[in-house]
Image (spheres, helix red, strand yellow):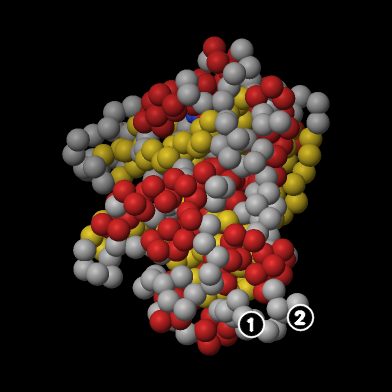
Amino acid sequence: MQDLAGKRIVLGLTGGIACYKSAYLCRLLVKAGAMVQVVMTQAAAQFITPVTMQALSGRAIYDSQWDARAPDNMAHIRLSREADAIVLAPCSADFIARLAHGRADELLSLTCLARPIERVPLLIAPAMNREMWAHPGTQRNLAQVRADGAIVLDVGAGPQACGEEGDGRMLEPEELLEDIVAHFQPKRLTGQRVLVTAGPTFEAIDPVRGITNHSSGKMGFAIARAAHEAGAQVTLVAGPVHLPTPRGVRRVDVISARDMLAACTAAADAADVFVATAAVADWRPLHTSAHKIKKDGSGRANALELTENPDILHTLAQSVRARSGQLFCVGFAAESDNLATHAKAKRERKGVPLLVGNIGPQTFGQDDNSLLLVDARTTRELPRAPKLALARELIAEIAARLPASRLPA
Ligand code: CTP
């Protein structure tokens, strides 16, 4: 998916060892469809060569305000006017201080200062030693650049190039890409709190076996990511899956359906939207054996008696908050055939305003899917596409159904 297709990004590098990560960030931005124009300070060029950045971006880099390539010799004006965003990665402590003071004595700070503030966002990815990061001077400067309209991305924690350990590492290139992509998504759910369930549940039979299913959790994780990109505060209640947590999303890991219900009930009071994507196991063993169940020679699983699991979606959809319109509930239906008929019936049975149907065998474990959206009046098909693209469309559909009073103007 080319999430940044057509976007023009000025990638500014300042002096820091994290410049080695900027090479890969540049590559990821280009792969995501962005046109990347690299601008480097003299200090950055001590850490990575302009040749490397030119090769990866496919464009000659800029590193001087006296560069004669711009016909009017005003590179800072052209660069800042042509950009959809300026991303500083890495942004050193010294460069943050320069931004805080509105300095303009070399090309990159000049370009940041000259940018049309309303139209060209400035995203900065700080990178420095933990003491420099924690220093009141740095924190004071960061507060100032934020107040001046810059978006300060997080820093990572962990081992640092200097041998110390702590906060101040630049985010990894994949994390930066996710933040940059999120920045460009429409903020349809600003101020909303979204609760999502994802993945399968696992119902233990004994210490070594259990009942589960093939759900990979990819659709639910994509919905959590899309909701976060749209500006929501997101809690993701995940069954046992091997997926990284989307950036900015609070994740609660659970195993069984009853754990999932407990986690959702605890979070539902502070949610405005609930999206039940999880493939919850319908049944669990009536008794979980503390010891491995042995074959008894009868040829039958006599010890295995099943009982129905609680219906999480139905439980939340019947809550006072949902019934009074404060919690908008969205269900999923994994069917094997007759999608429209089953989805319509399931929407009514679950008592939810919106139900999303899909064909189970065509979605489990896949990176793409197709969906059928069913509400009280209409059905709409979303043709096969990557799950993240579908998730973004679903978020738009949900936002369109929320009371206007709850949404950003
Ligand atoms: N669901 C749930 N708790 C359950 C079962 C299902 O929250 N115990 C939710 C799912 O997350 C999904 C919706 O209900 O949003 C429908 O799930 P699905 O498995 O398709 O339907 P079932 O209710 O299990 O109905 P059936 O198996 O009869 O098709």
Q: In the rendered structure, which amino acid carries the disc numbered 1?
A: Asp
Q: Secondary structure at mark 1?
A: loop
Q: State yes or no: Cβ of the residue under disc 1 lies below 8 Å from any atom of ligand 1.
A: no
- The answer to which image quadrant residue 294 occupies is top left
| Residue 164 x %, y % | 21, 63
- Disc number at residue 67? 1
Taking the spot 39% from the left edge, 55% from the top edge, the residue there is 155
Identify the residue position indicated by label 2 in the image: 71
Point 37% across, 49% down: residue: 139
Question: What's the amino acid at mark 2?
Answer: Pro
Residue 90 spot, x, y in % from top left: 45, 66
Task: Please tell me in which quadrant of the rendered image residue 63 appears.
Answer: bottom right
Outermost residue to the bottom? 51
Q: Viewer-proximal residue, 174 or 385? A: 174
For this orientation, the residue located farthest to the right is 378
Locate ligand 1 by image quadrant: top right
Number of marks drawn: 2
Q: Quick check: 392 above or below 27?
A: above
Side (left or right) of 292 relative to 343: left
Give the SS element for disc 2: loop
Quarter of the N terminus within the rendering: bottom right
- Residue, far left: 291
Determine which of the numbered discs, if any, sits on residue 103 in the image: none
Picture quarter with the C terminus = top right
Looking at the image, residue 15 lies above or below residue 330: below
Q: Residues within 10 Å of mark 2 (few under 14, many from 20)?
A: few
Q: 226 and 291: which one is in front?
A: 226
Which x, y percent locates residue 218? 53, 50
Q: Residues within 10 Å of mark 1 (few under 14, many from 20)?
A: some
Q: Position of residue 236 (x, y in %)?
A: 46, 39
The answer to whether residue 201 of the structure is visible from this angle is: no
